[in-house]
Image (cartoon, rainbow, N blue to C red):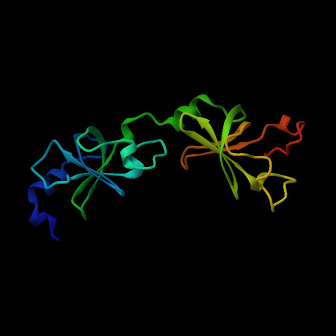
């Protein structure tokens, strides 16, 4: 469809927006793939709205459904990310206006610091440890010397409180790598380093 000729006023409005602009509106519809926002500014536009927020842009936290963050009729302020010319939408971010908990964690937690966390998941490649405040890290099994490859899940139980050491915080990929503390070896546990 030729949106420029079908909706010239809306096209012109969307072209005036710049990355980082703050737009307000009302949540008009929630779908499994994202949230439509009816924007306050600009020309009249068809429902469900010309603003759209993809799931990852709703929150820094892990969410199970968009309704964990917003509901229809809710007023929101979002940051404009880009003009989607294919769908004639303003791509928006709700999380861009919230502080990044991973950055805050990285600012207050040096590599080498020992923390306590809770085993959240035991996977074939490692253990996911919940460190609190929506932050989780990985103890990778590939780095577990002396551990048999057949049964890397031994010694970890979901819900168990475990001491861990922060070995790397990778902000660009949003990953935290952990290991078991050296003193775990004295307790009969082979540490991951």
Which residue is found at the position 84% from the left and 52% from the top?
145
Instruction: Say which quarter of the image contains residue 170.
Output: top right
Quadrant in which the N terminus appears:
bottom left
Left or right: where does residue 1 sit relative to residue 169? left
Query: What number of labels is visible?
Result: 0
Q: In the depicted view, which residue is nearer to us: 151 or 133?
A: 151
Q: Position of residue 53 (x, y in %)?
A: 32, 50
Give the residue drawn at x 15%, y 50%: 13
Choose between 78 and 14: the one closer to the eye: 78
Tell me where residue 39 sits by quadrant: top left
The image position of residue 42, as x and y in percent, is 13, 46
Is 171 situated above or below 34? above
Q: Is residue 172 above or below residue 166?
A: below
Where is residue 118 drawn, in percent x and y? 66, 38
Residue at 36%, 36% in the rendered image = 97
The residue lying toward the viewer, choosing from 112 and 72, is: 72
* Residue drawn at point x = 71 percent, y = 39 percent: 160
The percent coordinates of residue 128 (x first, y second) are 65, 47
| Extreme residue toward the top, this view | 108
Q: Is residue 185 left or right of residue 36?
A: right
Quadrant in which the C terminus appears = top right
């Amino acid at each position: 469809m030729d949106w420029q000729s079908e909706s010239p006023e809306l096209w012109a409005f969307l072209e005036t927006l710049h990355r980082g602009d703050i737009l307000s509106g009302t949540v008009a519809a929630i779908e499994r793939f994202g949230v439509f926002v009816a924007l306050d500014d600009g020309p009249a536009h068809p429902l469900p709205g010309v603003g759209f927020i993809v799931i990852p842009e709703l929150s820094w936290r892990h969410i199970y459904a968009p309704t964990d963050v917003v509901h229809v009729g809710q007023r929101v302020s979002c940051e404009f990310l880009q003009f989607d010319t294919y769908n004639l939408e303003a791509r928006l971010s709700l999380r861009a206006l919230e502080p990044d908990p991973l950055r805050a964690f990285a600012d207050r937690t040096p590599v080498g610091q020992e923390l306590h966390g809770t085993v959240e998941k035991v996977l074939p490649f490692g253990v996911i440890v919940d460190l609190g405040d929506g932050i989780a890290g990985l103890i990778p099994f590939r780095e577990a010397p002396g551990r048999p490859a057949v049964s890397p899940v031994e010694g970890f139980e979901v819900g168990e409180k475990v001491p861990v050491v922060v070995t790397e915080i990778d902000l660009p990929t949003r990953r935290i790598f952990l290991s078991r503390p050296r003193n775990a070896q004295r307790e009969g546990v082979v540490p991951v380093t």
